[in-house]
């Protein structure tokens, strides 16, 4: 009788945990996540830069949102970072970028720890007062019962002109004395979400 009661209690706890996981909000672990991009200047010099501060969550209905604090741009060169904040992103007017997508959470919640699932879905980017949609190829990995990871299988190639960033890039080019800065910018992400 005691064993049966114990097994029933254990089953109830596991079921409650699964239900909680399925209905939980998933919050972005900003310290473990990364959003980076590659800029190309003078036709053949490419450099990787990233944003240090990210916020985000996935609602129980699968609405995923990642907010990027543009002030947190990091290239390793402080003067360049300051110029990008002021001349390119114009952070006083546009302090954040927002990336959003609608995800079906059921297949992810059903994954065993360590299992992976490829996702192909539209992703909307709001940046510099403009909005553009991209088709993204992502890989979701269930890390454990409280965490999953989403990475870009292929970079999202963003065109700066779609977000009225071409004049800012031209200003940066002139200030730095460059012959060219590419308008096409590949963006990659490693995002880790934790259930709460």
Image (cartoon, rainbow, N blue to C red):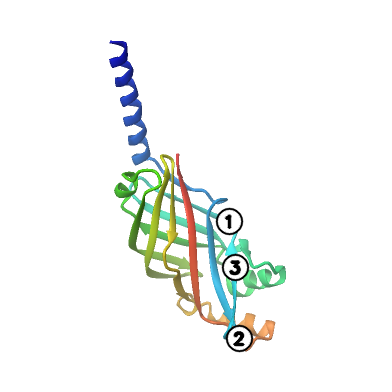
Reading the image, the residue beneath label 3 is 49
Q: Quadrant of residue 124?
A: bottom left
- Find numbered disc 1 in the image and state the secondary structure of the residue it sits on: loop
How many marks overall?
A: 3
The C terminus: image quadrant: top left
Task: Give neighbour class at mark 1: few <14, some 14-19, many 20+ (Cα, 10 Å).
Answer: some
Image location of residue 54, percent across then percent down: 54, 55
Q: Residue furthest top?
A: 1
Q: Residue at x 37, y 64 (%)?
A: 137
Q: Residue at x 33, y 17 (%)?
A: 6
Label 2 vs label 1, nearer the camera: 2
Reading the image, the residue beneath label 1 is 53
Q: CA distance from mark 3 to mark 1?
A: 13 Å
Q: Residue at x 33, y 63 (%)?
A: 120
Q: Is residue 173 left or right of residue 126?
A: right
Reading the image, the residue beneath label 2 is 42
- Find numbered disc 3 in the image and state the secondary structure of the residue it sits on: strand
The N terminus: image quadrant: top left
Q: Residue furthest right?
A: 79
**Upstream in sequence: badge 3 or badge 2:** 2
Q: CA distance from mark 3 to mark 2?
A: 17 Å
Q: Residue at x 35, y 50 (%)?
A: 62
Task: Give neighbour class at mark 3: few <14, some 14-19, many 20+ (Cα, 10 Å).
Answer: some
Task: Give neighbour class at mark 2: few <14, some 14-19, many 20+ (Cα, 10 Å).
Answer: few
Q: Nearer the viewer, residue 110 or 135?
A: 110
Using the image, determine if residue 32 lies above or below residue 97. above
Using the image, determine if residue 49 lies above or below residue 165. above
Per the rendering, the mark at residue 116 is none
Q: Residue furthest bottom?
A: 179
């Amino acid at each position: 009788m005691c064993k049966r009661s114990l097994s029933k209690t254990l089953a109830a706890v596991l079921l409650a945990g699964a239900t909680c996981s399925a209905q939980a909000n998933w919050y972005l672990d900003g310290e473990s996540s990364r959003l980076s991009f590659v800029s190309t200047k003078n036709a053949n010099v490419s450099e990787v830069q990233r944003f240090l501060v990210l916020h985000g969550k996935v609602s129980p209905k699968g609405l995923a949102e990642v907010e990027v604090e543009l002030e947190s741009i990091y290239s390793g060169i402080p003067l360049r970072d300051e110029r990008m904040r002021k001349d390119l992103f114009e952070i006083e007017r546009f302090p954040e970028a927002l990336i959003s997508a609608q995800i079906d959470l059921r297949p992810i919640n059903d994954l065993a720890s360590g299992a992976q699932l490829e996702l192909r879905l539209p992703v909307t980017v709001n940046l510099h007062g403009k909005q553009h949609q991209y088709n993204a190829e992502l890989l979701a990995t269930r890390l454990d019962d409280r965490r999953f990871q989403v990475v870009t299988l292929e970079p999202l190639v963003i065109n700066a002109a779609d977000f009225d960033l071409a004049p800012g890039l031209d200003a940066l080019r002139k200030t730095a004395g460059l012959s060219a800065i590419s308008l096409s910018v590949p963006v990659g992400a490693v995002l880790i979400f934790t259930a709460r």
